[in-house]
Image (cartoon, rainbow, N blue to C red):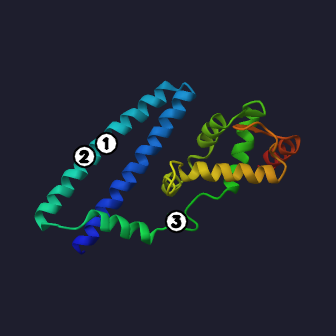
Amino acid sequence: MKENELEISFYNFMRAIDNQLRKFKKDKDEAFILKDFDMAQKVIEKEKLLNLMKDKIKDLKKEFNIIFNNETDKNKIQKKFENNNKNNFIKGKRTREEEFYIPILESLMELGGRAESKFVIAKVHEKIKEKLTDYDYITLPNSKKVRWENTARWARKHLIDLGYLNSNSPTGIWEITEKGIEFYNNQKKEL
């Protein structure tokens, strides 16, 4: 393995850790919203451990640079990596929008048919997190949004197009329609 490849591997690993830390932050925020303080505490402990690991990896990278007297320009590596992954999207790696349809409808049913998007998103995450991949937790390029949340919002738009969610709800509010309730109930019968 070339020195440059090792440098890129360090960069990719640190990026994956940062993505996981962002996921933990979202999980912690959701736990606080849902007043699940035990879950929030567990996430905080995981964050601490992951930050310790991150520090160890930084130390290993310093040792690597000392051993190889690595003069690699970090910005060159980052630009090369980002150019190779311009849209940061690999077809087939993200969870499909269709996987979000029933969890969105079910969450709205549990929330009384209408709720603020952040509460719906939190419930949807609980229902779908087992299906989500590491790729779903990557932050989108030029955005602070995590891929799975973006996919959920696109799924919502398609549910509106299908008439299952109300298109006239106030901004930030998701609302199921009668057609959506009927569709959800039919789907539950089939399962």
Precedes in sequence: disc 1 or disc 3:
1
Point out residue 172 in the picture as x, y percentages from the top left corner. Answer: 69, 37
Point out residue 115 in the picture as x, y percentages from the top left corner. Answer: 72, 33
- Which secondary structure, mark 3? loop
Which residue was labeled with disc 3? 87
Precedes in sequence: disc 2 or disc 3:
2
Residue at (53, 65) in percent of width and height? 89
Which residue was labeled with disc 1? 51
Classify 126 as above or below 59. Answer: above
* Residue type, mark 2 in image: Asp
Most foreground residue, 70 or 113:
70
Where residue 99 sits, quadrant-wise, is: bottom right
Quarter holding the N terminus is bottom left
Point out residue 82 in the picture as x, y percentages from the top left corner. Answer: 42, 66
Q: Are marks 2 and 3 in contact (CB under 8 Å)?
A: no
Judged left or right of residue 159, residue 78 is left
Residue at (62, 36) in percent of width and height? 118
Judged left or right of residue 75, residue 44 is right
Which residue was labeled with disc 2? 55
* Residue type, mark 1 in image: Asn
Q: Tell me the CA gap for discs 1 and 3.
A: 28 Å
- Which circle, 1 or 3, is nearer the viewer? 3
Q: Tell me the CA gap for discs 2 and 3.
A: 29 Å
Residue at (68, 53) in percent of width and height? 154
